[in-house]
Amino acid sequence: MTGPDPETANTARVYDYLLGGAHNFAADREAARRAVAATPILPVAARANRAYLGRVVTWCLQQGVRQFLDLGSGVPTVGNVHEIAHRIDPATRVAYVDVEPVAVAVADDLLRGLPTATVTRADLADPDAVLAAPGVADLLDFAQPVAVLAVAVLHFVPGDVGAVLAAYRRRLAPGSVVAISHGSDDLDDPDLAAMLRAGAESYRGSAMPVTYRSRAEIRGLLAGLDVVEPGLVDATNWPVADPSAPPSAFYALVGQVR
Ligand SMILES: C[S@@+](CC[C@H](N)C(=O)[O-])C[C@H]1O[C@@H](n2cnc3c(N)ncnc32)[C@H](O)[C@@H]1O
């Protein structure tokens, strides 16, 4: 894998910029401005998605899960998985995985000296490589429940992500969780859907094209798992509806291994 290319915008660093982070280059900021011009809800949606991540981690801990595999973990920012988890149980183990070198370097710095968390640079679409990486294989015990998180990342992965998630699922013990959020233009509000499509258009031809999936396709990604209530909802409404919040256009879905 190559190092960071400051001339080419990258989704990890664009997302960092949208969340108010400092680990981004001019090309990322320019791409973020273009994306926000096309899709003005993006910064609000990014924060809503991040808040969902926090709620889902807390929910997993309440279910007794003490291990996390965070796929597409991003540039560390406020409310990282290990920080939320360690407030509840400092023994919780967290394996972060991201393909982007800046995200991995920043996480590596942050996690130095912490025996309960690792970061691995890998493509989540290669489950065998991810699961065999020392940062994952040596940290997580797959005989015990693990929560696999794929939050705000699967719409950057083209192809059969259902098969990819199924490969992770085959390794999971009963009680394990798979939690996703996924951008989509399959929305009740036609104006919002049009805005999302314009946003995806602004990513076309870039290093980070977006693959939206329909609600039915997103539900299908967790086929075979027990879907946790309330099922597929806008991320702002998981697990409890917040009628005061604008929709994020990220769908949230959580499933549990029987
Ligand atoms: C929008 S950010 C989401 C970060 C974090 N999950 C969150 O929700 O706050 C998407 C992240 O997924 C990473 N990513 C994209 N494609 C990936 C892949 N195939 N394998 C691993 N990471 C990937 C990007 O580098 C980026 O850091």
Image (spheres, rainbow, N blue to C red):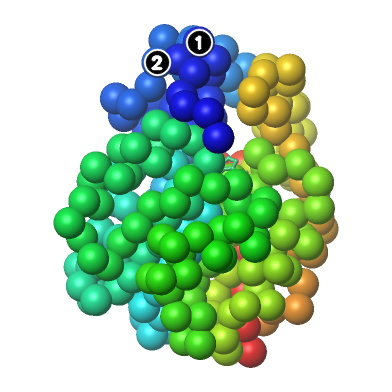
What's the CA distance linking mark 1 and mark 2? 8 Å
Q: Is residue 62 above or below residue 131?
A: below
The picture quadrant where one finds residue 230 is bottom right
Q: Is residue 124 visible?
A: yes
Say few, some or many: other residues with alpha carbon within 10 Å of mark 2 (under 14 / 14 to 19 / 20 or more).
some
Q: Toward the viewer: 162 or 219?
A: 162
Q: What residue sits 49% from the left and 18% below the top?
A: 5
Say which mark, if any, is on residue 91.
none
Question: Residue 68: percent from the left, percent from the top?
Answer: 43, 68
What kind of element bears circle 1? loop
Looking at the image, residue 112 sits to the left or right of residue 55; the answer is left
Q: Is residue 15 left or right of residue 228?
A: left
* Residue carrying label 1: 7
- As displayed, is residue 176 above or below residue 163? below
On screen, residue 122 versus residue 119, left or right, reads: right
Identified at 39% across, 41% down, the residue is 104
Percent position (x, y) of residue 6? Answer: 45, 15
Residue 41 coordinates in the image, percent (x, y): 53, 29
Amino acid of disc 1: Glu
**Label 2 CB-ligand 1 distance < 8 A:** no
Q: Amino acid at mark 2?
A: Phe
Q: Which SS class for mark 2? A: loop
Q: Residue at x 41, y 10 (%)?
A: 26
Q: Residues within 10 Å of mark 1 (few under 14, many from 20)?
A: few
Location of the N terminus by quadrant is top right
Do residues under tags 1 and 2 come within 8 Å of each other at their CB atoms?
Answer: yes
Give x and y (percent) for residue 188: 74, 44
Q: Is residue 244 visible?
A: no
The residue where tag 2 is placed is 25
Mark 1 vs 2, N-terminal side: 1
Of the pair 249 and 106, the residue shown nearer to us: 106
